[in-house]
Image (spheres, grey):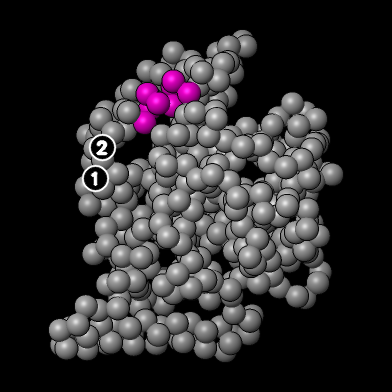
Amino acid sequence: MSEAFYAQLTPLNDFMAITEAQSFTPLPNDWHIVVTDVLGSTQAIAAGRYKEVNVLGAASIVALLNLAGSIDIPFIFGGDGASLAIPPSLLAPARTALAGLRRLANQRYELDLRTGIVPVADLRAAGQDVCVARLPLAEHYTQAMFSGGIAYAEDLIKDPARNRAYLIAASDDPDAPDLSGLECRWQDVPSRHGEIISLLVMATGSEADERAATMRMVLAAIQSSFGSDSDYHPLAVGQLQATLQPAGLRAEAILRSPTAFGARLSYQAKVWLMILMIRLYRTYEHLLGRPPWWDRYRSHAFTTTDYKKYDDTLRMVLAGSSEQRHKLEALLEAQYQAGHLIYGLHSTDRAILTCLVFERMGRQVHFVDGADGGYALAARALKERMAGATNTNHP
């Protein structure tokens, strides 16, 4: 019964339901929270390695989804890491997979993917309940939402004084985790309106009703500033193009192929040839007057992007103009100064995609972030404001 918990939850009907406490159901006490993040991600991003950072965040999700098989588990991609919840039956194999992934991150990227697992029971003992909800976005993709406890679990994993019982060390085992489905084959997607904004907002009121009201106000402000979902969605179907640039395929090839140069080159060449054949086949279908398969696939990919989610922090990637961003930023700053919320954002001119594709026209998810740092740099701005709020309140 515990394994089927998440799959059996009544789905939400609308994203606005995240502001209602009754939308969330407590996780079973025997489940565990998995937290991953790239240590030194800010420095790696400054060195132009944001794609590698994003790939590692997505890799921790695909490794556990491949372990889970038919077991439905909730997850949220955070740019430089991820948060997931797993049942007890996956605990031991998840430790092994994450230890192997940490070793791969060190070997292939020379990055440290910090990984840890915190029992839900430990969080509840500390007064931190963890609840979850599911919001279907497409036939083959459901977005998880979390409420309570996730930020505390992240703090535990990152705190050297408290994380010893939860951290997972890199493995010496040569067996790598199963990363089947992990793909990074889209070109960067330019904003239709000039900017791509990676936005994080955390309500800070002491009462749940107050925090819910703040979040409703923020969502209304986003709609007022940017329009409807179709107006600010960071992607458009016609913009989705697979890359033929070797540099664009390198991050995937480095992580998923054997270390030998020839094997890596062969992996990258096979992906390149597959993309070229798709382009040629698309031209052939156009000549026959048939609706191209590629266009159907791009529409499918568009509907399975995770551009808005919630884990007590609203996480969104929006397409907009600088004027729209300034309008929203002014409201957020006023609410921050009033003590109602903390926020961070990062703007760039394009979005990047890191994808998990288990079935080409079926189960998949496309993680979208702003290029050049996106969520990771927005998180840094949020933490700086959080420190500023703490210093203001406690001189």
Helix, strand or loop at mark 2: helix
Compared with 314, 11 (above or below) is below
Instruction: Name the residue rendered at 22%, 52% in the picture.
Output: 192
Which circle marks residue 231 in the picture? 1
Instruction: Name the residue rendered at 51%, 57% in the picture.
Output: 54
Front one among 104 and 18: 18
Compared with 221, 281 (above or below) is below
Helix, strand or loop at mark 1: helix
Whether residue 366 is visible, yes or no, is: no
Q: Is residue 68 magenta?
A: no
Quadrant for residue 158, please give it.
top right
Number of on-image labels: 2
Front one among 280 and 244: 280
Instruction: Name the residue rendered at 40%, 57% in the picture.
Output: 138
Instruction: Name the residue rendered at 30%, 71% in the picture.
Output: 296
Compared with 298, 385 (above or below) is above
Which circle marks residue 172 in the picture? none
Residue projecting furthest to the right: 165
Q: Report if the CB atoms under discs 1 and 2 are less than 8 Å apart.
A: yes
Instruction: Tell which circle, 1 or 2, labels the residue nearer the N-terminal end.
Output: 2
- The x, y position of residue 262, in whole percent, is 57, 89
Q: Which residues are magenta?
A: 212-219
- Residue type at the position of mark 1: Asp
Quadrant for residue 62, please give it.
bottom right
Identify the residue position indicated by label 2 in the image.
226
- The x, y position of residue 314, in whole percent, is 47, 36
Compared with 29, 268 (above or below) is below
